Image (tube, helix red, strand yellow):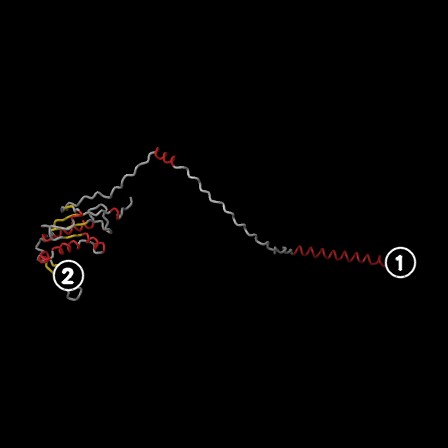
Amino acid sequence: MKTYSPKPEHIERRWYVVDASDQVLGRIASEVAALLRGKHKPIFAPHMDTGDHVIVINADKVVVTGGKEFKKVAYRHSGYPGGITGVRYDKLLADRPVFAVEKAIRGMLPKNRLGRTMINKLHVVAGPEHRHAAQKPVPYTFGQPPVWEGLPTPAPRPLKTRHLVEEEAVEKPASKPKTKPETAKPAAKKSPAKKSTATAPKKSTAEKSTAKKKTAAQKTTTKKTKAKAEPEAKAETTESTEE
């Protein structure tokens, strides 16, 4: 089984309205943060923003329990030495209820660029009216996360029967095989005949010795024939003088 990873075309953004009147600040923050992250969807992935848009109304009626409105302090530092300031929550909820709700929800989102994009889908209003009626938001009830059907089902493709396939094959004419035009090949250049530089094989020592013997024998035979021919020539000369 392959691991599923959500794609942008699979993400569907919905709009929800959360009524914060007489609700605890921590509970509102936890459930709204889950909607912004998309943890109520089966395609949730921690590295992607799969959440929905959330509108929080009646932020001025938020409640803080356990006497924390007199104990809890919202700190802020300017960045300079001694630039820390603190505001107690009873005064913060009375003067800036929208900031108090946004601060609580922001603290439950990832502290990176992903969390900064998620907080942009949050819209907090101090009163009961908001300006996002065109998006047709759905009221959200605490403790009941919305049901999400899952991936969008693609439209079924029409199945081709056997006779339709045969009809298509008959209608389409048989395509002729494409033949490439024959091009005259350029005549190959004849390379000039190279002179043979092959050398005669060298004779071995045995062949050399036999050749020397043959030449010596020929010389001796020629000497003998010359010696025989000389007395005969002398005899002929003497006979010719006597006559």
Judged left or right of residue 212, residue 48 is left
* Res. 236 image quadrant: bottom right
Please give the name of the residue rendered at 89% of the width and 58% of the height, measured from the top-left corner: 240
Q: Residues within 10 Å of mark 2 (few under 14, many from 20)?
A: few
Residue located farthest toward the bottom when viewing the structure as drawn: 81
Q: How many marks?
A: 2
User: How many angstroms separate mark 1 from mark 2 (CA)?
Assistant: 160 Å
Q: Nearer the viewer, mark 1 or mark 2?
A: 2
SS state under label 1: helix
Residue type at tag 1: Ser
SS state under label 2: strand
Judged left or right of residue 86, residue 209 is right
> x and y percent of residue 157 in the render?
29, 39
Residue type at tag 2: Arg
Residue located farthest toward the right when viewing the structure as drawn: 243
Q: Quadrant of the C terminus?
A: bottom right
> x and y percent of residue 97 in the render?
11, 55
Q: Which residue is mark 1?
A: 240
Q: Residues within 10 Å of mark 1 (few under 14, many from 20)?
A: few
Q: Which residue is mark 2?
A: 76
* Res. 84 image quadrant: bottom left
Please give the name of the residue rendered at 13% of the width and 63% of the height, measured from the top-left corner: 85
Q: Which mark is residue 85?
A: none
